[in-house]
Image (cartoon, rainbow, N blue to C red):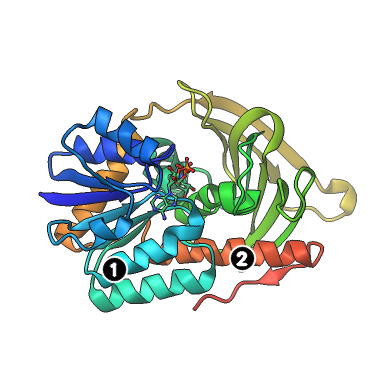
Amino acid sequence: MIKVGVVGCGYWGPNLIRNFINLPGADVKSCADISENRLKHMKNLYPSIVTTTNYKDIVEDPEIDAIVVATPVSSHFEISHAALDAGKHVFAEKPLTRTVEEGLKLVTKAEEKKLTLMVGHTFVFTAAVNKIKELIESGELGEIYYISTSRVNLGIFQEDINVIWDLAPHDVSIMNYVLGSRPESVSAVGHSYIRPEIEDVAFVTMKYPGNKLANIHVSWLNPSKIRKTTVVGSKKMLVYDDVSSLEKIRIYDKGVTVQPHYDTFGEFQLSYRYGDISIPKLDDAEPLKIECQHFVDCIEQGITSRSSGVDGLDVLLVLDSADRSVRQNGAEVKIEYP
Ligand SMILES: NC(=O)c1ccc[n+]([C@@H]2O[C@H](COP(=O)([O-])OP(=O)(O)OC[C@H]3O[C@@H](n4cnc5c(N)ncnc54)[C@H](O)[C@@H]3O)[C@@H](O)[C@H]2O)c1
């Protein structure tokens, strides 16, 4: 039985507590929050849970095996580092930390201590994203040309991070996971329309190895909630709409073929294919439940997580490069992985 302590009981923390409590191989002994009101709420929901306003009480508790960090990103490093130092496994919400340097320190510390460090890239635990990965790896979509995503809605404006750090970790983690590679460079433009200095709208373009392009539109200033990913391959194309409850993925048997032989430009011919549209059936298990179970499995079996600290660091490198590109009016920034 893995004994878990959860730090941060705001919007997301309670979802993590509920899932860990319901796992057969784990239990949540305690939770921490600086807000007494949030702790009162948790105590009402789970009367046996131990509550504290000081996360160090949990980190120093010898009965606790693992710490889950669901506080705003500015405190992820301090809490996660203290937990690793105390010999606890760590599951930190996304993005892993506020800076690349902090992320690197956590990865190094977890390796030194031989502890599991996982980051909450929830989408890599969804049936839809795993279906996309399967379709890409099986070759059904052909060679992947590009991926483009929109993750936009009205609010919620964050105070400590811009919209790239708030929303793009999801898209970058999805793209790295389904393509099985990491972007070589990033260019991004963004603007702060509502509050100075904190971009609320951004367009981030990445180049992956093999001439694959990727684009992410993130915004807190959009009239409707859109969560759409388009994957265009040489054989087929697909659209993943995370807002749709029943038809999340549509695979389009559409494409363009260049005639193999031509002598003059006049003979250069393209043929367009408009085939069937298929909608694969997807498992509807809660991704967070799968993610929490995966964390327990990683601890018990000593396996590397599907969203490891290193994967979290890869995402931080993209976010940091995107920020630098925004400051340079969209200049292409090469990413140097450690
Ligand atoms: N994986 C996902 O899909 C997903 C979804 C939502 C949020 N998140 C992530 O979860 C984290 C929390 O987001 P949220 O929306 O729940 O934020 P929130 O502001 O609603 O909650 C954060 C809570 O942490 C508490 N807190 C702050 N500093 C603390 C400290 N030092 N010690 C103890 N408690 C402290 C606050 O009082 C608050 O109750 C963020 O990193 C966010 O990116 C992930």
The residues tagged by marks 2 and 1 sit, at their Cα atoms, a distance apart of 24 Å
Is residue 207 found left or right of 194 in the rendered image?
left
Q: Position of residue 204 (x, y in %)?
A: 69, 54
The structure residue drawn at horizontal position 87% and vertical position 54%, both measured from the top left corner, is 264
Considering only vertical position in the picture, is 301 above or below 30?
Answer: below
Residue furthest to the front? 36
Of all residues shown, which one is farthest toward the left? Answer: 1
Q: Is residue 219 above or below residue 101?
A: above
Q: Residue at x 73, y 65 (%)?
A: 325
Q: Using a 10 Å C-alpha cutoff, classify the residue at mark 2 as few (fewer than 14 neighbours), some (14 to 19) or many (20 or more).
A: some
| Residue 48, image x, y percentages | 16, 36
Q: Is residue 247 above or below residue 37?
A: above
Q: What amino acid is at disc 2?
A: Asp
Q: Quadrant of residue 326?
A: bottom right
Q: Is residue 262 left or right of residue 218?
A: right
Above/below status of 195 relative to 213: above
Total numbered labels: 2
Which numbered circle lies on residue 320? 2
User: Is residue 333 in view from this perspective?
Assistant: yes
Q: Name the residue at 29% across, 64% down.
A: 83
Give the labeled residue for mark 1. 84
Q: Mark 2 or mark 1: which comes first in sequence?
A: 1
- The residue at 21%/63% (across/down) is 60
